[in-house]
Image (cartoon, helix red, strand yellow):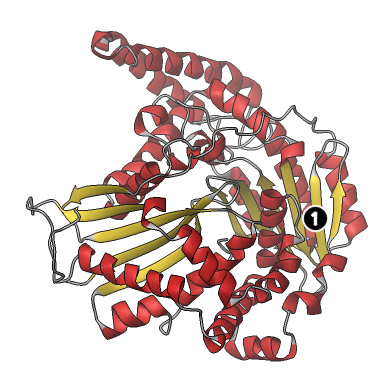
Amino acid sequence: MRLPFRHSVPGCFLVVLIVFFPSLLQAMDLEKRVEKFVLKNGLTVLILERHMSPTVALYIRHRVGSVDEKLGETGLAHFLEHMMFKGTTTIGTKDYQKEVPILSRIKTLGQSIDHERLKGDKADQEKIAGWQEQLEKLQAQHRKLFIPNEIDRLYTENGADHFNATTSQDLTSYFVSLPSNKIELWARIEADRMVNPVFRDFYVERQVIMEERRQRVESDPDGKLYEQFLSTAFSAHPYGRPTLGWPSDMANLSQAAMAEFIRKYHAPNNTVITVVGDVSTPEVMKMIRRYFGPIPAQPLPSPLVTEEPPQMGEKRTRLAMDAHPKLMIGYHKPNMPHQDDYAFDLIESILAKGRTSRLYRRLVLEEGVAENISVVNGIPGSRYPNLFSVFATPRAPHGNDELERLIDEEIERLKNEPVGAQELEKTKNQLRADYIRGLDSNEGLANQLSYFESITGDYRYLTTYLEKLDKVTAADIRLAAQKYLNAENRCVSALVQKKDRRPVTDQSSGPSRY
């Protein structure tokens, strides 16, 4: 499980919490303090009153991400997140009725251009050029009626902090922190966004997300390798698709597809709202029922049936670019709340959390073969079975082969030698501290409560996590490592320098694997 939030907290405060409260969650008694409501339209609401400062953190999470996209529409969830900041029929406009015919013509022209381009070599370039010129004139005309960033302005002028949104493989999230007396403003804005979004600057923003992909993937060796890593590890399951989307899909995303996507997935019965801060629960629920209650529920799409078939042999890929070598290794494993997922949270920390962790101490500090190394349990998401992954960068003159050999040795050690009692307790304390950091603020609590409610269907996963983690034994860790951390169950992706066309070798003996 990847912790969905990281938040700094003073070291002395951590020490006090860990010493006097073996389980912070028990001390806070979250399960009794969180109130859960389900509206008639299926909207789930979690409220935690926390009267520490006159502020409130507000999270809206839709249980939809790139994993839910259709073939040919990859990147749609992320694109929709961008478009949700363009306003509504009442926000972001000088005169919406005047906008309507212009937006309609923009949509028609954009569709015509897309359809013609799809003809490939047979496309009429003169037609495309003419339509493109008309489109640009219409867009310029429309901008005279459009008020950009008005949602941001409304929040900022009312004391907002941490106003943003994210899209992952699993979820789409919108969040903001506000003074407690501004909750009604939030309810009016967000309910309006759910019901009446207007896709202004659609074709302009489509170019923005394509440029984002060029910067984060096409021109970034790490991004390119990671995309190849996932697409190799997941040959059937949509976890192998990039959140930003494949370029050809992104270039043809349509307003019709987006409208259908938001109708199906941003429905109240697919949404969790979490409110944490200086609030009165009855007053908050009165506002939520007033603004969100009338939004109609929608028939939700059938559950995803495509499963990644069991891997019967190791998968290896190589990416040649003019960049520093890098190594990514992923092992298929179950997602939360499977019992083995708790063991892998501990394995993640044992191997690479902090300077005294096994891989960091040996590869970076002692032998100096790696510039950096990290381990993540739960790539790329947690709604479905995922990967336990190792990411490493060799330090010249060492190479990927030597790095992989040493990583393999430490993994074999996990499989063959029980973790010592002192190391296991230290690791559990680290995870307790991570949880404390995530629960120290209104934002952290709202994030985690909404995350676990959305992923597992029950926020109380958060309240039982440390208790179940404490029950994991050295034998459980060893068994999990033996079951999943095997060559036939893994994918290895290596970045090698393009300028060197010869097989990659390094300081270790034997032929290169790449």
Q: Residue, x 21% and y 63% (percent of image)?
A: 401
Of residue 12 and residue 103, the one placed in the foreground of this image is 12
Horizontally, is 67 left or right of 121 in the view? Answer: right
Q: Residue, x 33% and y 45% (percent of image)?
A: 228
Q: How many marks?
A: 1
For disc 1, the neighbor class at 10 Å (few under 14, some 14 to 19, many from 20) is many
Horizontally, is 363 left or right of 78 in the view? Answer: left
Residue with the most extreme right position: 282
The quadrant in which the N terminus is found is bottom right
* Rendering coords of residue 90 (x, y %): 69, 33
Q: Residue, x 36% and y 58% (percent of image)?
A: 329
Under tag 1, what secondary structure?
A: strand
Q: Is residue 310 above or below residue 256?
A: below
Q: Is residue 392 visible?
A: yes
Q: Is residue 7 visible?
A: no
Of residue 33 and residue 210, the one placed in the foreground of this image is 33
Horizontally, is 333 left or right of 456 in the view? Answer: left
Horizontally, is 429 left or right of 511 in the view? Answer: right
* Rendering coords of residue 409 (x, y %): 33, 72
Residue with the most extreme front position: 416
* Rendering coords of residue 340 (x, y %): 59, 61
Q: Residue, x 87% and y 67% (percent of image)?
A: 32
* Rendering coords of residue 80 (x, y %): 55, 36
Where, by quadrant of the figure, is residue 170 drawn? top right
Q: Is residue 158 above or below residue 395?
A: above
Residue type at mark 1 is Leu
Q: Which residue is mark 1?
A: 46
Of residue 324 and residue 109, the one placed in the foreground of this image is 324
Where, by quadrant of the figure, is residue 40 drawn? top right
Q: Is residue 224 above or below residue 406?
A: above
